[in-house]
Image (cartoon, rainbow, N blue to C red):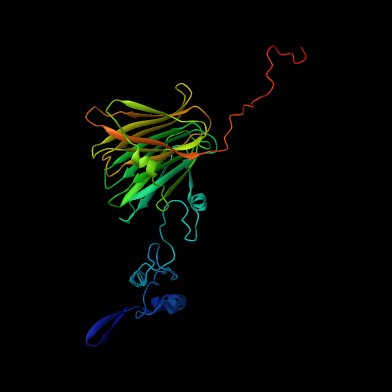
């Protein structure tokens, strides 16, 4: 190899025998060099961006101010919605609304209904089945690790005697949790509504009796009574009670085990279906003697066309043979 002087510096040049292979190598590499981007362009392509379409404001924002606040931030398609189907605004009748908003709770599963607005001070819980037994735990969650209301509900036939109770929810937000503690073969339909809630009648509010701790009272009803109202409250002390619907000796058709931390702000009100004859409601105060409570059990719906099935003046045959 020889040396040349360029800009005052000595550069080593390859010998002629090595120039020919280097020339062929440069011809092979030249197309690849032409395909490479210049140094002024980016070496990597930009990452793809997700395109989201603008839609209406998120659920719960109905005013113009709320919609304007969400422009450009969360005004996109795709959002988190509560468990179950949404309630229709166009519903007028409560029966139709309950049919469309109820969800099926399988055995061993849990469903929750949350209410963030403090204006919701009571909700109604309705549970029913297709004729199978119903076994559920109902809790009211108010803040972390705070359960002011608990109840255990058992119904022998959820179609003949559906469960319906009103839970007071003052000082929101509150969450109603319903757990099906039955087996997988015993699902039930659940619905929680905050509008058109049943309220106790004037007779139910006026006819209350004091039940001391450890005592019980029974309320028998005639066969024409289709349902009864039950209202239990205290003077502000905790409430522990057991409500039973019996039909026959020690034959429990429906059992409710109830706990409330404040029986004055959170009284218990429910409606019990009493089809057939021989229905007796038994209310037991399971708390100590220092915690009395007031209970009121009155008839709600009365069937005036009820008949026992007996026909006056009919033929009564004793001994079996009609022609004797």
- Image quadrant where one finds the C terminus: top right
In the image, is residue 32 above or below residue 282? Answer: below
Q: Is residue 184 or residue 234 the one in the foreground?
A: 234
Q: Residue 205, position in %: x, y?
A: 35, 42
For image coordinates 47% across by 78% down, the residue present is: 31
- Image quadrant where one finds the N terminus: bottom left
Instruction: Farthest residue to the right: give it.
Output: 323
Q: Residue 175, position in %: x, y?
A: 34, 48
Q: Residue 234, position in %: x, y?
A: 27, 37
**Number of marks in picture:** 0
In the image, is residue 158 above or below residue 34? Answer: above
Q: Residue 144, position in %: x, y?
A: 26, 46
Instruction: Farthest residue to the bottom: give it.
Output: 7
For image coordinates 40% across by 67% down, the residue present is: 57
Q: Is residue 100 or residue 109 the one in the foreground?
A: 100
Q: Is residue 230 or residue 185 the one in the foreground?
A: 230
163 sits to left or right of 217: right
Q: In which quarter of the image is residue 218?
A: top left
């Amino acid at each position: 190899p020889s040396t040349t002087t360029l800009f005052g510096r000595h550069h080593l040049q390859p010998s002629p025998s090595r120039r020919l292979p280097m020339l062929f190598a440069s011809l092979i590499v030249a197309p690849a060099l032409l395909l490479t981007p210049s140094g002024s362009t980016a070496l990597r392509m930009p990452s793809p961006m997700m395109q989201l379409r603008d839609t209406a404001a998120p659920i719960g924002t109905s005013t113009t101010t709320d919609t304007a606040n969400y422009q450009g931030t969360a005004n996109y398609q795709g959002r988190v919605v509560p468990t179950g189907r949404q309630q229709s605004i166009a519903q007028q009748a409560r029966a139709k609304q309950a049919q469309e908003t109820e969800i099926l709770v399988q055995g061993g599963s849990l469903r929750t209904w949350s209410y963030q607005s403090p204006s919701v001070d009571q909700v109604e819980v309705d549970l029913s089945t297709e004729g199978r037994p119903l076994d559920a735990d109902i809790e009211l969650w108010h803040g972390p690790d705070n359960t002011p209301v608990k109840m255990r509900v058992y119904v022998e036939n959820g179609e003949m005697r559906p469960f319906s109770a009103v839970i007071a929810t003052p000082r929101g937000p509150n969450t109603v949790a319903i757990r099906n503690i039955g087996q997988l073969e015993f699902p039930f339909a659940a619905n929680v509504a905050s509008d058109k809630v049943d309220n106790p009648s004037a007779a139910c509010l006026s006819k209350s009796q004091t039940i001391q701790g450890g005592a019980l009272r029974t309320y028998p009803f005639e066969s024409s009574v289709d349902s009864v109202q039950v209202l239990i409250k205290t003077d502000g002390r905790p409430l522990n009670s057991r409500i039973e619907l019996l039909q026959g000796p020690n034959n429990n058709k429906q059992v409710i085990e109830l706990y409330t931390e404040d029986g004055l702000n959170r009284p218990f009100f429910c409606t019990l279906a009493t089809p057939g004859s021989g229905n007796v409601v038994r209310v037991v105060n399971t708390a100590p003697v220092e915690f009395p409570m007031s209970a009121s059990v009155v008839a709600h719906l009365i069937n005036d066309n009820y008949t026992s099935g007996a026909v006056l003046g009919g033929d009564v045959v004793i001994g079996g043979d009609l022609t004797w």
